[in-house]
Amino acid sequence: MMPYINRLKANPLRLLLYLEWILFIISILGQFRFPNMPFPPIKVPPLFPVVKPDLSLESFLLAIAFLGLGIYQPNDKHWQNIVYIGLGFILIGLTGISSETNLRFFLPLLLIMVIRGCLTFKLFGSFIVAGISLSWILASLYLVVKNSFSNLNVEQVPAIITPGIKPEIIYQLYSNKEELKALIINMAINITILFCLITVFVFILVNALMSEYRSRQKLGTVNQQLREYALLIEDRAMLQERNRIAREIHDSLGHSLTAQNIQLANALLYLRSNLDRSESFLAEAKKLSSHALQDVRHSVATLRADPLKGKSLKIAIAELVKDLEYRTEINFHYQTDIPDRLSNEITSTVYRIVQEALTNIIKHSEATEVKISLQLIVNYLEVQVKDNGAGFDPQENTTGFGIQGMRERTTALGGKFKLVSLPSKGCHIIATIPLVDKL
């Protein structure tokens, strides 16, 4: 029962799930007969009438199993989806074989199969499922009509052809066998047309809902990809900017220092023979020094955007942990086994993830112990940050920018981000980043 409840909570198209339940209830109720219903006129049956079900216990259990198939979530594995739909038709057939069921039982269940076919397959596959359901109804009607013609008497008039009407009354109204045959054929045609119309309506409705749902999914996927690309472009833009600044420092500072060196050499050259000229060279050298100093200050201020400040990832995180130990009363356990040579993208991303995780711990968790682990596993870098703090319910806290930022930074590099937390059980963050072609 719990899987079905969980599916109900997670199902984005609950309307279709409710429709399955309603059709199933209609199918089961259609197997109960209310005895001694007068006609005419038609009266409301007693509040608690004595009813007799046509459905055996075995058939009822098979029908429940058919409903339980709704727990299945369609996936990309085509053969599993085919087995799922095939099993649904088999259960319907077994239910009919094990009990004296009629078309009132099959009609709602076959409509459920049409719904599930639309949910499981694309347009062509859903057409096939709808065609099988319609063929089933046509075959059943053919057998009913054929049986009625071969045993044309009052007792053999099928209940589905004359619902709610006593066979004796039908026989009185249509004492001629030809008239009775015409009635049966007309009712069969009406049932066929009605089922076709309902099937077309359900088919269009479900496909419209699925089309809208898939469009929303694609939009969400594209939006997530855009956010990942934006974050990746931002990181790469920062790297390019730092490289540009490094080139500017090399070019401008190198030029200034070279020019200053020339001016100082000239000042030394004229120091004894021409003091005034030597002073002018020294003044120009000082001017060049001031200009170079301004360039250095500007470049250093820009380079401070680098979180590691030119240090390796191991050292940068170790210094971060040491600083937090000094400023807090938390016991940190830092363990690392990673290569020294990592790409700038990975080192910056990992540092930011650890930094944000530790910031959240200090602000919110009230933890007394934190474990930080950086491990190389095959071609992946695994980052773990675990605390013994207050914890929280991740389902109720989905808007935190810190957690979202860590997740986006990880996925931007093709990694996987996992957060495990429970109230009073602490929090455990695991980020796995691939290292292939990124070293």
Image (spheres, grey):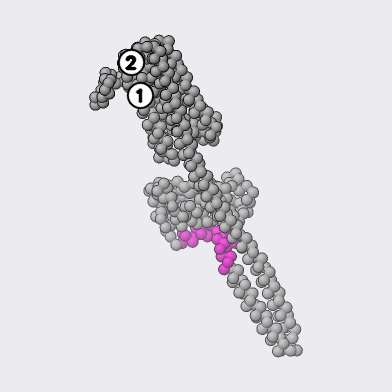
**Hey, what amino acid is under mark 2?**
Leu
**Hey, what amino acid is under mark 1?**
Gly
Residue drawn at 48 percent across, 56 percent down = 356
Q: x, y percentage for residue 110?
A: 44, 26
Residue drawn at 38 percent across, 26 percent down = 27
Q: What element carries label 2?
A: helix
Rendered image quadrant of residue 144: top left
Q: Earlier in the sequence, mark 2 or mark 1?
A: 1
Q: x, y percentage for residue 197?
A: 45, 30
Answer with left or right where residue 208 lies relative to residue 302: left
Query: Is 378 included in the stretch rendered in magenta?
Result: no
Q: Judge by depth and name the residue closer to the eye, 353 or 171.
A: 171
Q: What element carries label 1?
A: loop
Residue drawn at 32 percent across, 13 percent down = 172
**Label 1 crowding class (10 Å Cα cut-off): few <14, some 14-19, many 20+?**
many
Q: Mark 1 points at which residue?
A: 30
Numbered label attached to residue 328 = none
Count of numbered marks: 2
Residue contact between numbered discs 2 and 1, judged by CB atoms under 8 Å: no
Q: Judge by depth and name the residue closer to the eye, 68 or 333.
A: 68
Residue 123 visible to an observer of this rendering: yes
Q: Judge by depth and name the residue closer to the eye, 369 or 308.
A: 308
**Label 2 crowding class (10 Å Cα cut-off): few <14, some 14-19, many 20+?**
few
Q: Judge by depth and name the residue closer to the eye, 110 or 253.
A: 110
Tell me the distance, in whole angstroms, between the alpha carbons under discs 2 and 1. 25 Å
Q: Give the range drawn in magenta.
A: 301-326
Q: Mark 2 points at which residue?
A: 173
Q: x, y percentage for residue 291?
A: 63, 76
Q: x, y percentage for residue 105?
A: 39, 23
Type of secondary structure dominating the magenta stretch: helix
Which of the two discs, 2 and 1, sits closer to the camera?
A: 2
